[in-house]
Image (cartoon, rainbow, N blue to C red):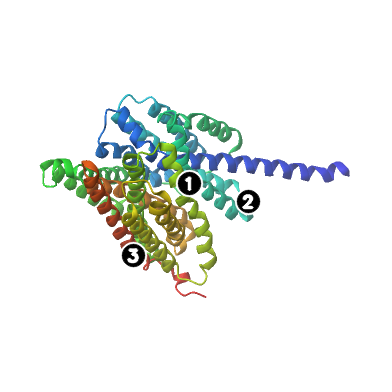
């Protein structure tokens, strides 16, 4: 009698322990992939010095190369794994990410670093959607919402941790921002092999449009190239014009394939859902502003104020720490305020924070008076805007399309990041001396603020039908 009664308790305990191990393993891998989007910014100065004063336009590819490939491959690699097995896709992606991280650390020159960052992005694009798919499949229905929130929160923590972790590691060497991924990746591989059960989606029977992914990679990459090289090549030079022509052809070809392929990267039918379409537009615009602002502040702190990477990372951290606080506030008022209005308020707040920075910052370090107020306001804006954009994107989609919709809006965020870095580089150019640098950075901040206002206007169109009127 006692034995019989005790048996179910032991089984339940083993399941609970197993689920915690699954959640830990999958969240850790997602954290790594997200962290690498933010950790590199503070290492720019050190990387540039090690590679013989590489120009900002060339250094930008350390960020852009990663983001372009991550954006283009996120959806198709996720669908491939849905069809052939998510665990294999996850382990393969994590293994590639880990090996590529080691190769990044050993890079002898800038362009080999850019190439290995591209391999990192391929691994991240495979492990991110599969980690969520595996988590959903392994979690009982009554615990899925909590599990996904934990998974998303740990990924979001990377935004706050990235600059600080990067600053700490760069004190030793910029190469350590990649070396640190190796033991964590190996631990993740061991955990995945031991704890995580495989799953797949039986409804996915076709191969996704990999050629379409290639076209959007070429299109966005060529657009970024034309923007960052415009100041040095000349905006009317044959090289720059050719870049923009290739960009237009790649994006047009991607759209045509999306209209005709049975399993495109972006399903045109989804874009006819008003909230989804406007959420993606807003995601691109807002991330243009966010990426440009973040890079501008990092470079100003290090190149003008002469701060170390660690001090820069600590100075940046308060902004991202505002994000979860104001995301919680937006969640509490979401039933009383239109979703589009919440996102618009967030975008407008980010614009206001950028204006405060642009009008206060100067040659002499004055963190508390010149930078911190605007950066905190901007962080609060991100907390209102970004989670709202992500949730609104899928609110009107059929349940079977929610995962795809979430991946597409994540893709839009990465495209915005690429364009934001590229536009910033194009506006700043190659200033000489403080006066030119101050003018160039101020212009870039005004462009960021303007883009945030445009994002605020586009956000007004993204309120889902279910939330068209506040209660």
- Asked if the residue under mark 1 is in contact with the one under mark 2, i.e. CB atoms within 8 Å, the reply is no
Which element carries disc 2, helix, strand or loop? loop
Which element carries disc 1, helix, strand or loop? helix
- Residue in the foreground of this view, choosing between 117 and 210: 117
Q: Nearer the viewer, mark 1 or mark 3?
A: 1
Q: Nearer the viewer, mark 2 or mark 1?
A: 1
Horizontal relation, residue 1 to residue 99: left or right: right
Q: Which mark is residue 192?
A: none
Identify the residue under disc 3. Answer: 458
Q: Position of residue 47 (x, y in %)?
A: 34, 32
- Residue in the foreground of this view, choosing between 302 and 136: 302
Q: Taking 172 as reference, is 466 above or below it?
A: below
* Distance between mark 2 and mark 3 Cα atoms: 37 Å
* Distance between mark 2 and mark 1 Cα atoms: 30 Å
Residue in the picture at 35% in, 47% down: 297
Q: Which mark is residue 160?
A: 1
The reply to whether residue 419 is in sight is yes
Residue in the picture at 56% in, 49% down: 136
Q: Position of residue 62 (x, y in %)?
A: 33, 37
Looking at the rendering, which quadrant does residue 80 occupy?
top left
Q: Taking 88 as reference, is 421 above or below it?
A: below
Which element carries disc 3, helix, strand or loop? helix
Q: Position of residue 32 (x, y in %)?
A: 48, 39
Residue in the picture at 63% in, 43% down: 20
Identify the residue under disc 2. Answer: 140
Q: Position of residue 49 (x, y in %)?
A: 31, 30
* Distance between mark 1 and mark 3 Cα atoms: 27 Å
């Amino acid at each position: 009698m006692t034995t019989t009664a005790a048996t179910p308790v032991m089984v339940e305990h083993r399941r609970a322990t197993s689920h915690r191990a699954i959640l830990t393993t999958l969240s850790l891998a997602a954290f790594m992939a997200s962290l690498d989007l933010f950790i590199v910014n503070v290492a720019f100065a050190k990387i540039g010095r090690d590679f013989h004063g590489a120009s900002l336009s060339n250094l930008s590819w350390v960020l852009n190369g990663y983001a372009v490939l991550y954006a283009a491959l996120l959806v198709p690699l996720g669908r491939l794994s849905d069809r052939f097995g998510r665990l294999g896709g996850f382990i393969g992606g994590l293994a590639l990410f880990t090996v590529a991280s080691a190769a990044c650390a050993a890079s002898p020159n800038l362009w080999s670093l850019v190439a290995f960052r591209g391999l990192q992005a391929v691994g991240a694009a495979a492990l991110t959607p599969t980690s969520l798919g595996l988590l959903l499949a392994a979690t009982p229905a009554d615990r899925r919402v909590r599990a996904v929130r934990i998974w998303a929160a740990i990924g979001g923590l990377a935004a706050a941790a990235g600059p600080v972790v990067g600053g700490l590691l760069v004190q030793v060497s910029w190469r350590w921002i990649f070396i640190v991924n190796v033991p964590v990746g190996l631990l993740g591989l061991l955990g995945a092999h031991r704890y995580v059960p495989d799953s797949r989606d039986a409804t996915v029977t076709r191969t996704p449009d990999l050629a379409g992914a290639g076209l959007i990679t070429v299109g966005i990459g060529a657009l970024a190239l034309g923007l960052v090289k415009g100041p040095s090549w000349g905006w009317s030079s044959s090289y720059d014009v050719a870049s923009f022509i290739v960009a237009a052809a790649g994006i047009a070809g991607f759209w045509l394939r999306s209209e005709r392929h049975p399993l495109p990267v972006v399903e045109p039918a989804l874009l006819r859902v008003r909230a989804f379409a406007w959420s993606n537009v807003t995601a691109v615009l807002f991330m243009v502003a966010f990426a440009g602002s973040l890079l501008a502040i990092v470079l100003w702190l290090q190149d003008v104020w002469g701060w170390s990477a660690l001090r820069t990372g600590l100075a940046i951290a308060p902004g991202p720490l505002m994000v979860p606080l104001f995301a919680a506030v937006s969640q509490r008022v979401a039933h009383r305020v239109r979703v589009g209005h919440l996102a618009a308020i967030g975008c407008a707040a980010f614009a206001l924070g950028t204006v405060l920075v642009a009008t206060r910052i100067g040659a002499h370090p004055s963190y508390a008076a010149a930078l911190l107020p605007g950066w905190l306001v901007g962080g609060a804006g991100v907390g209102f805007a970004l989670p709202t954009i992500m949730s609104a994107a899928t609110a009107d989609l059929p349940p079977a399309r929610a995962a795809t919709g979430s991946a597409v809006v994540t893709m839009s965020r990465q495209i915005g990041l690429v364009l934001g870095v590229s536009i910033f580089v194009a506006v700043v150019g190659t200033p000489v001396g403080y006066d030119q640098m101050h003018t160039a950075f101020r212009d870039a901040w005004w462009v960021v603020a303007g883009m945030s206002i445009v994002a605020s206007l586009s956000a007004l169109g993204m309120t889902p039908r279910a939330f068209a009127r506040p209660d």
